[in-house]
Image (cartoon, rainbow, N blue to C red):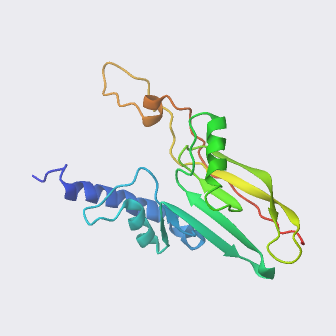
Amino acid sequence: QDDESSPEAIDAWHESDIRDMAKLLEPIKKRILGIVRGNHFHHFQDGTDSEQRLSRMLGVRYLGVEAAIRLDFARAESLVLYLHHDGGSGGTTMGGDVNGLLKAAGVINPDVVISAHSHKAYGFKEPSHELSRSGDPVVLARDRAFIRAGCFKATNEPTAPSSLTQYVPNYRAVKAYRPTNDGWVELEVEFRPK
């Protein structure tokens, strides 16, 4: 009989889960800019992680633990995104979470910060100022967007505990976290004449 806890068996189990995720993402893979490593990844025996495997299966770019992406549009407009799974997580309260996102913006001063980790789904914009980079020095106002990307993992307890059956509490219950926001956040960008 095979050893179900062998490194090979554990790798195969994770590989199967990643294949299932790849099937779910297949219809939108051409819209995926890249995959950032999260905090519940699996390291395979060959040294790669689960997000690298998912990237390879989908044929999309693997971005590591953080990424800065510049999207160039017509009329020489561009948008800089900063992506990080944990991107400044500041705690379990909403205020701490928001402060963590604001802190993450200091890394490269992007137009948009997108992070996950806390499993919350919300977005907000905050005005900022910067000095023009060419021509006469003029103070320009711009909005910066901050997004917590949400999640797709329900965190309710499936059944009530009982002394008659095995009880395995979920992660949310063990940590006494609030329920998550299942789903995602959409961002609409509008470029205004300068």
164 lies above or below 39: above
Is 185 on the left-hand or right-hand side of 189?
Answer: left
Vertical order, 161 against 67 (above or below): above
Please state if 53 lies on the left or on the right of 153 as rendered.
left
Extreme residue toward the bottom, this view: 75
> Looking at the image, is 132 positioned above or below residue 97?
below
Q: Residue at x 20, y 59 (%)?
A: 8
Near-viewer residue (148 or 139) = 139
Quadrant in which the C terminus appears: bottom right
> Left or right of 19: which side holds 71?
right
- Above or below, comparing residue 53 to residue 168 in the picture: below
Q: Is residue 28 left or right of residue 64?
A: right
Residue at left 60%, top 70%?
A: 31
Q: Nearer the viewer, residue 22 or 144?
A: 144
> How far from the left and from the top, in percent, is residue 133?
79, 73
Q: Quadrant of residue 57?
A: bottom left
Residue 173 image offset from top left, x and y in percent: 46, 30
Q: Residue furthest top?
A: 163
Residue lying at 78% horizontally and 51% vertically, measured from the top left: 126
- The number of numbered discs placed on residues in the rendered structure image is 0
Measuring 63% from the left and 62% from the top, which residue is drawn there?
108
Residue 155's spot in the image, x, y percent? 50, 37
- The percent coordinates of residue 46 (x first, y second) are 26, 66
The residue at the far left in this view is: 1
